[in-house]
Amino acid sequence: MKICFVAPRLHTNQHAWIDVLEKNGHEVFFLATNLGRENQQHSSFQPTLIPSKQFTWLIRLILKSTFLIFLKKPRGALYVRPQFRFLYSKIKTINPDVVIVRDVAPTISLQAFLAAKIMNIKTILYSQHPLEDSLKFHVRIFQFLRLVPRHHITPMKKSFENNHNSKSNTYYVPLISHIASDRITSNASADKTLRIIFIGKFSLQRKKHLLMLQAFHAILSENEVRLTIIGTMDTDNPPKAYKDVQKYIKLNKLESVVDVKINLPHKQMFEEYKKHDVFALPSVDEPFSISPIEAMACSLPAIVSDTNGAKWCVQNGENGFVVESNNQIDLENALLYFTDSKKIKYCRKRAYTYVDLNHSSKVFYTLFKSAINA
């Protein structure tokens, strides 16, 4: 089967999807308007870049104003206009059996839906939205106008019971991770030090880098703990979050216990996970981050906030904790829980088991086939 994905960029959470599909004999194509940072790109798969131009300042202003009305911050992909003829030609040349399009707001998404409709190619909408919930209002409007297909897949669900919502015709297809099968028998800390890993782009304030650092500092005086902060950023123009982190570390003399790493290649991340004991990401309003799944695949319990879509994958005291957004005390308590070696050993085993049972390549491929062939 020929499968063509269309999105503003190839996100790291789809790398494993592509690998599994190709391994099972499918031809996979990916059309994007942005290749993303080099360290986020797939090591052996190259998406096709669709030439794009920015909208005029007036249209950009209208788009921004419209999103602000709904208290949303528009992403850069909304400000560009891909060349429709080029996109249409690429899809026609590929002649895929199915086109899977990320979201409906980016211009490239609407253009892809239109091109596929003209060519009578099956299309599927992919977005990060809980399986059990009704689709967002603007998506339903696009569907009513027949601009967007009613066939929808999502990597988010609130319970283990169902994989299909017949009301919205939505199918569950999980995000997956390359399982680090050797991690379950290893121990990152030979001593009693608790090693914490945090991963988040410095350009995104919602990742809450400083909150993570402050919670760590609060538990430091009475516990043997170390923190690694990993993030991507433009080194020529460091964002505010990075500057705040560096300032806080220097002001509180934390250089010996906090390690900040910038722009690590994605393929190196599993080696970083293996050096640590627990993963923490207190980000807010996070649709669904792949890093908690990757961490649990390496037997690290995951701490996430209650506004992170990954919260549905975390069971308190089993494979991690869900903490209240922007609540430093709640985050501190979750971190302190794992200073008990018996508790962290218990949770590490269950973190690995959870991912192995629910986010393995086999589970993904079974559910993906069901969703695509429906």
Image (spheres, rainbow, N blue to C red):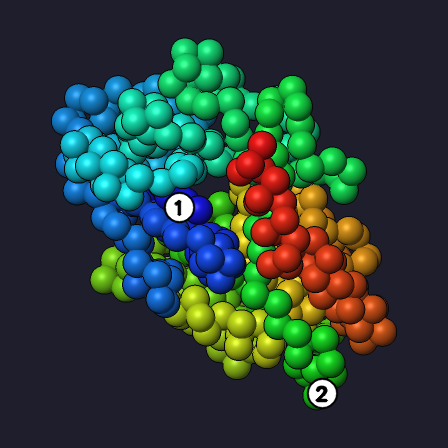
Residue 33 image point, x, y percent: 26, 43
Q: Give the amino acid type for the residue marked by disc 2 in the picture.
A: Asp
Residue at 33% across, 29% down = 116
Residue shown at the point (17%, 42%) measured from the top left = 51
Q: Which circle marks residue 2 in the picture?
A: 1
- SS category of the residue bearing label 1: strand
Q: Is residue 44 visible?
A: yes
**Mark 1 burial class by Cα count in 10 Å: few <14, some 14-19, many 20+:** some
Q: Quadrant of residue 179?
A: bottom right
Marks 1/2: CA–CA distance = 51 Å
Q: Quadrant of residue 265?
A: bottom left
Choose mark 1 or mark 2, whichever is in front. 1
On residue 191, which mark appears? 2
- Residue at the image position 41 percent from the left and 56 percent from the top: 202
Q: Nearer the viewer, residue 190 or 81?
A: 81
Assign the C terminus to one quadrant of the image.
top right
Q: Residue at x 26, y 20 (%)?
A: 62
- Is 306 placed left or right of 289 in the picture? right
